[in-house]
Structure formats: structure tokens, C-alpha cells
């Protein structure tokens, strides 16, 4: 088996059908799809899952053991995966026909651990689209690289989401990287830890979008997030052995200070925000100093967080 596709499913309804059809049309045929149902109640979702598994032997239905959230679903799928490579996809997005082939070819040709690709963001309300590509660094990201080759903004070059990358499954099992058991921000630890540990990363062609990521659906969890979970994700990252490396520590803390306001903006509750702020201050005071960051912009961001009151 070449590729395992792991897909958490929870009441996605008719959008699940279109998602799975776009997998059927892949130019790469050697793959399995592990649909990990998170206790869906929607009859249409259940019918679609059963239909695809009944008529295509590459599709398999697993259960998360309750309504546990996407982290448990992805970890369940990862344990059952039989492919050389693994990719974690969402049940409401769409995939270009050459998606799996492009990701896998990049891994094959470069003996890489992770291949990362571009995607299109589509607003489901307006149908407006935008291309999002990893930020290039000439002489580095146009070949095989690792996080040690990138500056301290390295983690911000592709974000933490798990679905714009394909990973060597043996690498994940060897390192023990899994999704953190949180209701949201569960992909932060997985997304950042995996690339910090990988010795060989490669970009797919940046002008070639592989996924259509659909946004602004009111049913999506990402419209409202608990920022306290974001702090838990950074705390877990900071306890890992890769933080013994000063450069990796700078990359993590830089991502925290640049992304902190976004965490607050998506918070549904003032108390959540206050707890998040207290956590961010605790991490900054423990892991950084006034002179920790080399550039003034990041030093100012750090200072603003420490002085902030909610």
C-alpha cells in the first residue's frame, strides 16, 4: 500500500459525497481511505460512508469510540494505516485529481519525510478563491531542507494544519508524534512537532494547488476556537526535546507572539481569553527575556502581550 488517507467524519452530509468523489478521481490509484466516524447522527453522512465502503474496497469505516473530536479520529486512523505515506484530510474539502500523486512523487524523488503543497481557499458563501502557497526561501526551499535551514519565521511558512502535507508513516511512528487530544488547536502540536523533527522536507510545485479548502461554513468548528487549547499546544511543544536547540525554541516562540492576537480574535468567551492571556504571559516569562528576539517587531509583540489586560 502506497498511501493512507485518514479522514475524520462528523455529520458532513452532502459535502462528504463530493469530497469522496474527488478522491475516486485521483490519478494515483494505490491508496486506502480510512473514514473515522466520530459518532455521526446525520443519516445522510452514515449512508454515504457505508455506500463508499461497500462499493470500493479501498474505503474502510472506523469508529472513534464516541464523539471525541478530530484528534482522536486522526490518531485512530494513524494506528490503523497500512500505507508507506499518510495524509490527513478533512471531510468537507475538495482535492485536485493529481493531489496524491504529486505529494507522493515529491517524497519518492527526494527520499523526504514530509512534502508540503499549495492550496486554494474557497469562501462557500461568495465562491471567491485565493491561492495559498508556502513561502519560498531561494536556495533552501527549492530543494530538500529541514527547519534548521530556515530563519525563526520558519513555522509560519506553511501553518500547522495537517492536510496540506503528506508524511512518511514510519517517520511518525518512530518519533511518536500524534495529535494532541484537544477539541480545537489539536493540529498545532502535530503540525509543528513533525516538521521540527523531520530531517528532509520538500515543497511540491508552489504554483500548483492540490486542495480546495472550504471556509466560512457556519458549521465549521474553526469559526470559534477556545484559545486556552492554543496555549496547551504551545506548552506541549515547549516540553519536547527539540527545544534544547535554541533555534527551534526561537521558531516556536516567534510563532506564539505573531499568532497570539489571532487566537484572541477567534475566542468565543472573555474568560477564555483572560486565561489564554495569562498562559501566554507565563510562557513568555519562562522561556524568553527582553532581548530574546533579534528583531524589534517581535520584541514589541512580546512586550505588548506582557502588558495586555483583558
Image (cartoon, rainbow, N blue to C red):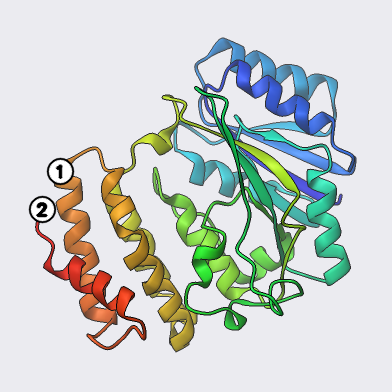
Q: Are marks 2 and 1 in contact (CB under 8 Å)?
A: yes
Q: Is residue 42 left or right of residue 1?
A: left
Q: Secondary structure at mark 1?
A: helix
| Residue reaching furthest to the left | 309
Q: Position of residue 108 (x, y in %)?
A: 86, 64
| Residue reaching furthest to the top | 43
- Residues packed near mark 2 inside 10 Å, few (<14), some (14 to 19) or many (20 plus): few
Q: Position of residue 304 (x, y in %)?
A: 19, 68
Q: Nearer the viewer, residue 172 or 233?
A: 233
Residue at screen point 78% across, 33% down: 23
Reply above or below: 233 against 83: below
Q: Nearer the viewer, residue 231 or 27?
A: 27
Q: Which residue is mark 2?
A: 310
> Residue 177, can we see it?
yes
Residue at screen point 55% across, 41% down: 73
Residue at screen point 14% across, 45% down: 271
Q: Is residue 9 left or right of residue 297?
A: right
Q: Position of residue 131 (x, y in %)?
A: 63, 45
In 3D space, how far apart are the residues under numbered discs 2 and 1 (Cα atoms)? 8 Å
Residue at screen point 52% across, 80% down: 151
Q: How many marks?
A: 2
Q: Position of residue 176 (x, y in %)?
A: 58, 66
Q: Secondary structure at mark 2?
A: loop
Q: Which residue is mark 1?
A: 270
- Residues packed near mark 1 inside 10 Å, few (<14), some (14 to 19) or many (20 plus): few
Amino acid at each position: 500500500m502506497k498511501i493512507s488517507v485518514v479522514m475524520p467524519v462528523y455529520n458532513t452530509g452532502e459535502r462528504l459525497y463530493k469530497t469522496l468523489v474527488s478522491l475516486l478521481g485521483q490519478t494515483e490509484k494505490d491508496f486506502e481511505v480510512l473514514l473515522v466516524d466520530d459518532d455521526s447522527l446525520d443519516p445522510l453522512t452514515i449512508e454515504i460512508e457505508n455506500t463508499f465502503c461497500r462499493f470500493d474496497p479501498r474505503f474502510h469505516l472506523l469508529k472513534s469510540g464516541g464523539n471525541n473530536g478530530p484528534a482522536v479520529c486522526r490518531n485512530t486512523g494513524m494506528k490503523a494505516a497500512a500505507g508507506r505515506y499518510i495524509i490527513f484530510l478533512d471531510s468537507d474539502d475538495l482535492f485536485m485529481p493529481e493531489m496524491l500523486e504529486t505529494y507522493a512523487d515529491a517524497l519518492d524523488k527526494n527520499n523526504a519525510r514530509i512534502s508540503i503543497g499549495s492550496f486554494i481557499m474557497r469562501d462557500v458563501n461568495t465562491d471567491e478563491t485565493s491561492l495559498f502557497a508556502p513561502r519560498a526561501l531561494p536556495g533552501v526551499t527549492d530543494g530538500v531542507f529541514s527547519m534548521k535551514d530556515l530563519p525563526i519565521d520558519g513555522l509560519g511558512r506553511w501553518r500547522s494544519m495537517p492536510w496540506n502535507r503528506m508524511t512518511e508513516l514510519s517517520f511518525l511512528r518512530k518519533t511518536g508524534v500524534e495529535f494532541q487530544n484537544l477539541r480545537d488547536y489539536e493540529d498545532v502540536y502535530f503540525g509543528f512537532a513533525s516538521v521540527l523533527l523531520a530531517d528532509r522536507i520538500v515543497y511540491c510545485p508552489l504554483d500548483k494547488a492540490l486542495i480546495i479548502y472550504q471556509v466560512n461554513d457556519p458549521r465549521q468548528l474553526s469559526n470559534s476556537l477556545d484559545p486556552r487549547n492554543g496555549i496547551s499546544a504551545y506548552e506541549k511543544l515547549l516540553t519536547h526535546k527539540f527545544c534544547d536547540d535554541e533555534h527551534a525554541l526561537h521558531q516556536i516562540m516567534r510563532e506564539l507572539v505573531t499568532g497570539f492576537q489571532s487566537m484572541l480574535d477567534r475566542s468565543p468567551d472573555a474568560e477564555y481569553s483572560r486565561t489564554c492571556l495569562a498562559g501566554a504571559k507565563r510562557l513568555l516569562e519562562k522561556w524568553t527575556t527582553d532581548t530574546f528576539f533579534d528583531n524589534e517587531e517581535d520584541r514589541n509583540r512580546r512586550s505588548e502581550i506582557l502588558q495586555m489586560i483583558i
